[in-house]
Amino acid sequence: MKFLHSFITLALCSSMAFVTSAQLSMPTQTIGNTRYYYHKVKKKETLYGVAKKYGITQDDIIKYNPSAKDGLKTNQILFFPVDAFAKPSADKTGVKLPATQKVAAVTHTVEKGETLYGLSRIYGISIDAIKQANPIVADGLKVGQVITIPQDESFEVAKAKPSITEAKESNSEIVYHRIQAGETLYYVSRYYNTTIAAILELNPGISAENFRIGEVIRIQPNDNKAVMVEKPITKFVTHELKEGESFTTVASDNNIDVKKIIDANPGVKAKKGSIINIPVAANDTVVVRQSDLDDKNAKATITSKSNADTINVAIVMPFMLHQASPSASALNNTEFLKGFLMAVDEVRRGTRKHINVTVHDNRNSLAATDSILHLPGMKQMNMIIAPSDAKQLDATNKFCKQNDILSVNLFAIKDESYATNSFSVQTNIPHSYLSAELCEWYDKKFDNRSTIFINPVNAKEEKDVCHDLKKHLQKQKSKTASVTIDSDFNYDSVNNLLVAGNEYVIIPSSSSKALLTKLIPILKRIKQERADVDFVLMGYPEYTTYLLEMKDDFHAIDTYIYSRFFYDEKDSKTRNFEQEYSKWYGEEMRYVVPRFGLLGYDTGKFFLQTLANVEGGFNNRVINEYNGLQTSFKLQRLSNWSGFINKDLQFIHFTTHNTIER
């Protein structure tokens, strides 16, 4: 099917009678796979009379019955495709396309972790624009607030007459639409003069099956584009049977199935002098609205890059194989690959899928990364594990977006491409969402406890997670106190703050090992001497790197740590994996945090299983959760058009009973 783009007007659309006419009052007949209305010409009937009787044009009759151009013959049968002459049922909803369409205002309900900056990125508008439209957010966002997303209130459907020689893309801005009760994808596509395919392409978080009331989608209205479509049709040419001719001989002479000849001549006897119809395949070029295009193949999913039994994955990382002594970072990447391959083997055996993995050493070079992305076959990937360098990651994200490939960012924490790139995956929970998850968990876990912050001397106030928690507790009007570790800091500095019978959470305002080293002896002593108070220590992800030296201390004090990942060496499944790793590679994993072999395994298990087992792969709003050995995944799109972030945050409790709870 060939498309030629040009301007479109409503006048042109309405001039096509087969689009706007009402259902014809005629009998029907199925020929091949197509249903037709038909009319048997009566004596003295004219082309003009038939057209007037059914409210159609003479050109419509001639289009499908070209012999009618030379006049009608008695008993001649005229055919009209039902699909072309029956008014589409969706039009009964009253969808009309005036020259200017109204765009309804869209609201957004603030969710935990969302920021003004984040919303500005997702909706493609400035922070100032959001503030001007919503004075209530002057002091920041609050969960549950309903704010207005400013956008143009209307758009032009048509600006000029169509021109076959002029091909122009739509210049209209993106608008946002909240799905209302009774609306379907087809309804919305017609209202905005676009296609179902275009809507799905802009909103991979939705499908025809999960087109739900209340969801917000983004749309690019078609304001100045018509399409010249060449489509196959059947025309009916009349033929007067001669002596010795039959339906069978006519079918043979015209290379047509005899049944089609019979069906095209209802009630006609095959005898000399009979006027019969011969269905002939032809092409017709018509101007249609963008929304009238065939959307059968509306959207290619991430899993459709290959056949249903194959998954293609590329890993692009700096393995630094050209170096005689690879760096620690390169060794970590190699361990990641080893763990990933173990997951490949497990998923392959469990799903009977063919999993093709190509591994590329980009030597930590942007030029090398660009060269790799242009290699034959890279466009056929379902997923690419991207490098962590900002420029290399950006190049990979852009390539994946252009070619409908999942781009998985495992290492760069501050990358924000997920806000605008629907194929980008950020597996490390972003700062604002981490803080929101922590504050919510803290409220539930320590609702009745007072909080004591231990501050380093001369420390600058940083907008980190601890800063966010302090602000949150102030808003909650929770009981808090603070003490500074200076030259006078000692046992009494903390002990004097603890009132008998009360419960406390003690939080260092820094994750530094030096601060923790000064604090631990004091907290252990208080734990031993003050049976009249109960307290726990709240720590940071960095504490997982201190476990070799301080794990027993954490148990003695009763410590909680939040982290994006956690390695529990006593877990039976983890021990089994480590044994398998040693069998595969003849060596143990390096003692680093996180364990990169485990990271590779968890990553492979989650992403490969989702691609293999989940209908639609990653073309959904929310993906099934995965609880890994070290890393867990709880992926969610921030909108129907954004990429994914991993909202999983682990809370680890080192109990005084020498156990670990997650």
Image (cartoon, grey):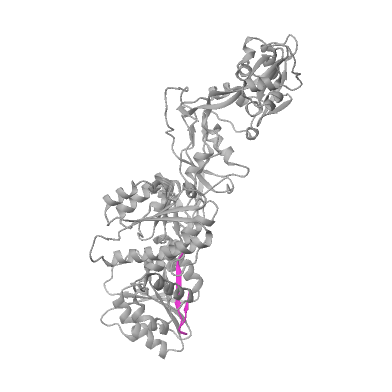
For residue 65, above or below residue 420: above
- The answer to whether any part of residue 496 appears in the image is no
For this view, does 462 lie left or right of residue 499? left
Which of 418/120 is in front?
418
As for residue 366 lying within the magenta part, the answer is no
For this view, does 403 lie left or right of residue 26? left
Point out the stretch of residues depicted in magenta.
648-662
Q: Quadrant of residue 528?
A: bottom left
Q: Residue at x 60, y 26 (%)?
A: 19
For residue 522, above or below residue 14: below
Which of 572/523 is in front?
572
Q: Could you tell me how many numbered marks the image carries? A: 0
As for residue 658 lying within the magenta part, the answer is yes
Q: Position of residue 554 (x, y in %)?
A: 40, 81
Which of 647/598 is in front?
598
Which of 181/26 is in front?
26
Q: Position of residue 500 (x, y in %)?
A: 46, 86
